[in-house]
């Protein structure tokens, strides 16, 4: 114990790992020692060294958590460490409501109660609690407003009206212009509610901005598909950090602009900003979706992750496996899958097995893909079985498709996509009787084919299309362009398949 205490005193920055490692065993029955050490942490940097996470790890070590924990919570709230939301997780089943603990000030108690409701998704209750707080004569502070705005951002479909009301109150007090944290919370709330123009207006009116404010606005633009505005704001940003670059790269990936994501990642490297874990994962995803075009980059990024000291996890392994799969490199993908288990000692999840099935399926090695499914340590889901079923159509393997269909019907008998795919497999090999049997089964079971819809986003407007639909305002121009494309295809020697009678043509 004495050696650990000396280490704790010498390494004040490592207190969190210290607590998480053995601290709870040392102090399980000596809560007063924990309390004294907690107050000792107040020294240095002009304030508390304790953050919310460490506070609750320490609380978990003591028997008097209900008393001591709330006391720590009050200290953290007053210091702005954001401990209130975490307290709701521990006490959501315990003491509730404001002023239940004499150690807390009324403002902290009300904020705690509001946060408890918002963190559990009870938006009506958290709004009512805020109203009761005002009626009781207790003035909210910036942490109260941040709690309210954060809840509105987390549940945008149900809280926009209340979020605007909170913003009105904040604006009346001038906190959206004079308090960086509150102003940033307003920007984040409007961005996640889809009102990016209001978010930008609030951003421009902030008296002082920090990097978090800039990053929040950039992320809001990317989240809402305003890519050009995001890039323009990024160029105006006075000081960029790793989060700024990550917001752009991840935003491109989420919107499907994989080549741009790679370009910005490379530009990030040229600027001297070291890649972080989140960015590398996003780039691996981009390489996977670009197939052979991004394969070399995927290999380099995966190696870079390990060189930089990032230990690959399931997410990064899945991204790398997907890249190998899209590129058709079966042996390399299987070798990586073996590395997951033998070198890193990680138990593969169903997503990883799905990548291996897809790896075999794309290469036409359907029986080997089936062998993986049959020997998986968990039951296959629709995604795993569906990838092999799609390969059956590509390679015309009707027998295997019928076997897979039996498994798929057990998982989800009402899924129309599986019926349609099997019917099209029969049609592809000219087995019209089989296709008709599938259609009859769909009719008997009451399964209706949902119309396939394709969409494209242009200047933040989404245009949706259905086969045979002529309701679009630019229908004439669209079909004229299709005819030109068909003419170009025929001129180049393309011959369309004529032996495939897809189900959609008979509906």
Image (tube, grey):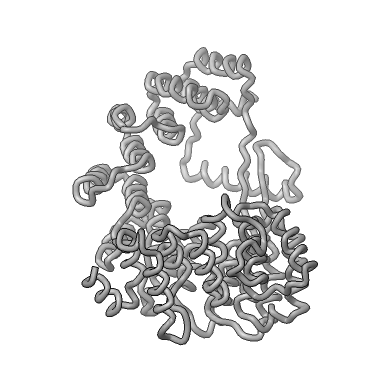
Q: Quadrant of residue 242?
A: bottom left
Please report the residue visible at 50 percent of the width from the left and 68 percent of the height from the top: 247
For the N terminus, the image quarter is: bottom left
Of residues 388 and 120, the one nearer the viewer is 120
How many marks are shown on the rendered structure?
Answer: 0
Of residues 114 and 217, the one nearer the viewer is 114
Of residues 23 and 467, the one nearer the viewer is 23
Residue 280: image location, x then y, percent: 37, 63
- Which residue in the rendered view is the most extreme toward the right? 135
Q: Is residue 330 visible?
A: yes
Q: Is residue 146 left or right of residue 62?
A: right
Q: Is residue 473 left or right of residue 287?
A: right
Of residues 285 and 111, the one nearer the viewer is 111
- The answer to whether residue 344 is above or below residue 188 is above
Please report the residue visible at 66 percent of the width from the left and 39 percent of the height from the top: 466
Q: Is residue 187 visible?
A: no
Q: Quadrant of residue 236?
A: bottom right
For the C terminus, the image quarter is: top right
Residue 299: image location, x then y, percent: 29, 58
Residue 36: image location, x then y, percent: 40, 74
Please report the residue visible at 47 percent of the width from the left and 16 percent of the height from the top: 431
Residue 492: image location, x then y, percent: 47, 45
Q: Is residue 323 left or right of residue 121?
A: left
């Amino acid at each position: 114990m004495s050696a650990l205490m000396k280490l704790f005193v010498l390494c004040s920055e490592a207190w969190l790992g210290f607590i998480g490692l053995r601290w709870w065993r040392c102090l399980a029955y000596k809560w007063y020692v924990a309390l004294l050490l907690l107050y000792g942490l107040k020294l240095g940097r002009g304030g508390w060294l304790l953050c919310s996470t460490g506070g609750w790890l320490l609380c978990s070590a003591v028997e008097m958590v209900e008393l001591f924990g709330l006391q720590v919570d009050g200290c953290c709230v007053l210091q702005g460490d954001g401990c209130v939301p975490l307290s709701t997780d521990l006490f959501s089943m315990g003491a509730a409501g404001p002023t239940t603990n004499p150690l807390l000030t009324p403002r902290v108690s009300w904020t705690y109660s509001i946060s408890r409701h918002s963190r559990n998704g009870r938006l009506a209750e958290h709004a009512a609690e805020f109203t009761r707080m005002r009626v009781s004569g207790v003035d909210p502070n910036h942490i109260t407003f941040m709690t309210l705005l954060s809840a509105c951002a987390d549940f945008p479909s149900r809280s926009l009206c209340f979020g605007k009301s909170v913003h009105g109150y904040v604006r009346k007090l001038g906190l959206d212009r004079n308090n960086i944290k509150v102003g940033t919370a307003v920007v984040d709330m409007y961005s996640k509610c889809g009102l990016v123009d209001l978010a930008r207006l609030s951003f421009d009116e902030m008296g002082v901005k920090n990097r978090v404010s800039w990053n929040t606005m950039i992320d809001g633009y990317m989240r809402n598909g305003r890519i050009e505005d995001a890039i323009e704001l990024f160029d105006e940003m006075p000081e960029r950090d790793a989060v700024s670059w990550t917001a752009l790269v991840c935003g491109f990936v989420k919107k499907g602009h994989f080549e741009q994501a790679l370009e910005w990642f490379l530009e990030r490297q040229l600027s001297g900003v070291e890649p972080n874990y989140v960015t590398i994962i996003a780039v691996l995803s981009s390489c996977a979706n670009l197939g052979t075009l991004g394969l070399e980059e995927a290999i380099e990024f995966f190696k870079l992750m390990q060189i930089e000291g990032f230990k690959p996890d399931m997410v990064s392994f899945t991204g790398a496996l997907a890249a190998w799969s899209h590129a058709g490199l079966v042996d390399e993908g299987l070798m990586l899958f073996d590395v997951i288990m033998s070198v890193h000692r990680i138990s593969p999840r169903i997503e990883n097995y799905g990548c291996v099935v897809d790896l075999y399926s794309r290469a036409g090695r359907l029986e080997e893909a089936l062998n993986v499914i049959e020997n998986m340590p968990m039951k296959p889901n629709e995604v795993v079985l569906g990838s092999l079923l799609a390969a059956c159509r590509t390679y015309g393997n009707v027998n295997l498709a019928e076997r897979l269909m039996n498994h798929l019907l057990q998982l989800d008998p009402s899924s129309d996509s599986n019926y349609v795919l099997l019917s099209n497999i029969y049609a592809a090999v000219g087995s019209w009787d089989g296709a008709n049997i599938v259609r009859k089964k769909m009719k008997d079971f009451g399964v209706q084919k949902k119309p396939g819809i394709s969409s494209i986003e242009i200047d933040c407007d989404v245009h949706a299309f259905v086969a045979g639909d002529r309701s679009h305002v630019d229908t004439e121009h669209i079909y004229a362009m299709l005819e030109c494309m068909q003419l170009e295809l025929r001129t180049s020697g393309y011959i369309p398949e004529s032996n495939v009678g897809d189900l959609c043509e008979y509906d």
